Image (spheres, rainbow, N blue to C red):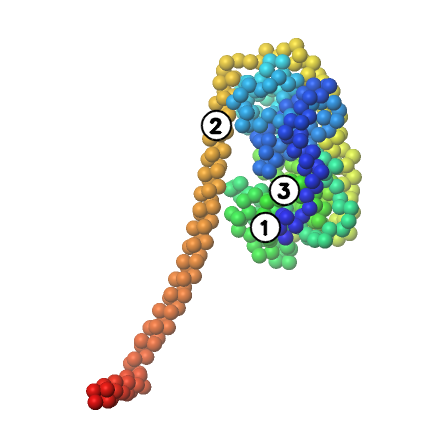
Amino acid sequence: MTPTDLPINQKQSELYRRLAAGDHADGPRGTIAFCVSTDDLDEGKGDVYVALGLAKYLQRLGWGVRLWPASSWCDPMPRVDVAIAMVESFVPGLVDEHTSVVAWVRNWTERWMELPYLDVFDGVWASSTASAEALRARTGGDVPVVPIAVDLELFAPADEAPETRFAAMTTVNFWGADREIMDAIDGLPETRSVMWFGANGEHLRLPQHAEHGGILDFFALPSAYAASSVVLDDVIPPAKRYGNHNSRLFESIAAGALPVTNARDGLDELGLDEVPVYSDSATLDAALGAAAGPEGTELAAKLGAVVRERHSYERRAEALDPLLIGLRDAAARGTGRPSALLAWAAGLQANLMRAESERDAFLADARAVGTERNALQAELGAVRGESALLRARLEAVTSARSYPYYRAAQRAYGLLLRVGRRLLGR
């Protein structure tokens, strides 16, 4: 199975790309800018998909929406009513004083709390109660809980039974650091087949019962999830500590699959406390076994009803609309934010991010070279093995010279040579 075998939702892909291009940047309610790591949807960055999922439904409420990618952060931001920072690396130093800036803490809570300029933000949202409590203690202000959600027009059960079915699959990316799911899958019985899609799969060492299918287009994810009975999730440790669940949880459920996650904290407040949880190979194997039966199908349907009722981006947009109106009205009066020091920090951060991006590209090339080197070493080892075998055979033949029959054959051969020379000499 390759990514090209899974159909892409072209209609939603085109809609998201128009949003990313700024085709809906103006609206009667005002304009919201999402500060994201990139505006290139093909880079596979989660923050931009979350931003566009919410932006799509805010636009329907009358808001203009646009992206403000990291490549532009060294420039002054055009005048907008509200800017929502989707990543902790955004510094609000080049934002107009008539723009309210919100920090949406979806993960990396501790990094956000360490920011010396966190108090400069006009609002802070958190995706879990634990994060909200920690941020309230840090800022002394109100921190609404705003979990991420799912676009139900994109992620939904398949209308027809998929031609290909996966017993279990995951879409976890590999960025160089080991993930909990790696050891869990590695220790599964060989009868538990797993399909793995995601970035940098060539650097993973997978057991024979796991297959890597390459990078999957975001708009093919609904097809992949709908074709899988179980979707394996892996929440990174910084998010796991605060119960910050990611898009994979909501999207897989909305598509009709049953997720199995490694993070229990935070599920109850989402109404998803029945989601199976694993901590090692044994618990993952047990969860997969339970999910394969009728009870797994019933649970997937039950969780799907919760997600469709409570966790759509349409619901999030409706809930956030009054908060955004309040931020817009406050920004109109001026925030008094601009300062030379913060502007300098914004430029410095933009340059730092550019350097980090170049570093990551270099490391990716280095990993590719390392992979090629390992392959060559394996080939060299095979050649050395064949060479040793040939050497052993040669030594066996050479040692046979001590046998009487070999000596006799050698004398006979010498005699034939002498006779031949005499005949030729005539």
Per the model, the C-alpha gap separating discs 3 and 1 is 14 Å
Q: Secondary structure at mark 2?
A: helix
Per the model, the C-alpha gap separating discs 2 and 1 is 33 Å
Q: Is residue 66 among the parts visible in the rendering?
A: yes
Whichever of labels 2 and 1 marks the residue nearer the N terminus, that label is 1
Give the percent coordinates (x, y) of residue 318. Answer: 75, 26
Whichever of labels 2 and 3 marks the residue nearer the N terminus, that label is 3
Q: Is residue 165 above or below residue 198?
A: below
Give the percent coordinates (x, y) of residue 33. Answer: 64, 23
The amino acid on which the numbered mark 3 sits, given as a three-letter code, is Asp
Q: Is residue 265 among the parts visible in the rendering?
A: no
Which label belongs to residue 125?
Answer: none
Q: Is residue 339 above or below residue 300?
A: above
Q: Which residue is mark 1?
A: 212
The amino acid on which the numbered mark 1 sits, given as a three-letter code, is His
Q: Which residue is mark 2?
A: 352
Q: Secondary structure at mark 3?
A: loop
Per the model, the C-alpha gap separating discs 2 and 3 is 29 Å
The amino acid on which the numbered mark 2 sits, given as a three-letter code, is Leu
Q: Residue furthest front?
A: 426
Q: Dot 3 surroundings within 10 Å: few (below 14), some, or many (20 or more)? A: many
Q: Is residue 94 above or below residue 368?
A: above
